[in-house]
Image: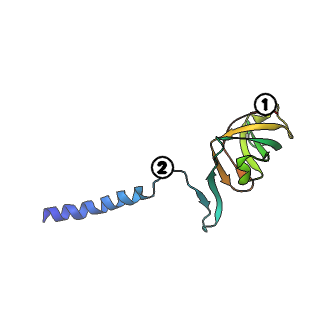
Amino acid sequence: MKKQSILFVMLPFVLVFRLAFMGCENEPPNKVENDEGELLASQQSVDDSGSFNAKIIEIRESFVDDNYVLVEPLEGEAIRNIADRISFIGRFFSNTGFSVGDYITIHYDGFVAKSYPAQIVATGWSALQR
């Protein structure tokens, strides 16, 4: 009888523990949805070695030391198959000397959030050697 009561006491704890960790994943989500289940953005990997060449379309201050940067990937870039406009936040980007119309090489983590404009996490940038 005592074994049965221990089982009934332990069973709810085991079930709660199992349910708590059931939804844990090691991979980033592929889709972002709002509360109504509408697709807001999805993420896609691009086979371009994590860099592409682009023309700067817009630079805006968005935070204290950050800048919102909008670029247009050049023709022939693999990432252009996903989006014709890509944005990222560039820490101290305004201090680089780049301006609208300049051509740059952007290094990023390899993932593109498919929104409009598409979004990336830039890890670095340099002047494009033309």
- Camera-side residue of 75 and 54: 75
User: Residue at coordinates 36% horizontally, 60% vertically from top-left?
Assistant: 16
Residue 53: image quadrant is: top right
- Provide the secondary structure element on which disc 1 rests: helix
Q: Tell me if mark 1 has few (under 14), some (14-19) or many (20+) residues whose alpha carbon lies within 10 angstroms of its own.
A: few
The three-letter amino acid code for the residue at tag 1 is: Thr
Q: Point out the residue furthest to the bottom here.
A: 36
Q: Is residue 83 above or below residue 94?
A: below
Q: Which label's residue is closer to the chain start, 2 or 1?
A: 2
Q: Residue 72: percent from the left, percent from the top? A: 79, 47
Question: Is 59 on the left or on the right of 122, as rendered?
Answer: right
Residue 30: image quadrant is: bottom right
The three-letter amino acid code for the residue at tag 2 is: Asn
Q: Is residue 33 visible?
A: yes
CB contact under 8 Å: marks 2 and 1: no
Q: Residue 63: percent from the left, percent from the top? A: 73, 41
Quarter of the N terminus within the rendering: bottom left
Question: Is 8 on the left or on the right of 33, as rendered?
Answer: left
State the CA–CA distance, disc 2 to disc 1: 36 Å
- In the rendered image, which residue does mark 1 sit on? 96
- In the rendered image, which residue does mark 2 sit on? 26
User: Residue at coordinates 79% horizontally, 47% vertically from top-left?
Assistant: 75
Q: Residue 77: percent from the left, percent from the top? A: 74, 46
Q: Point out the residue furthest to the right here.
A: 101
User: Residue at coordinates 78% horizontally, 42% vertically from top-left?
Assistant: 54
Q: Residue 130: percent from the left, percent from the top? A: 82, 33
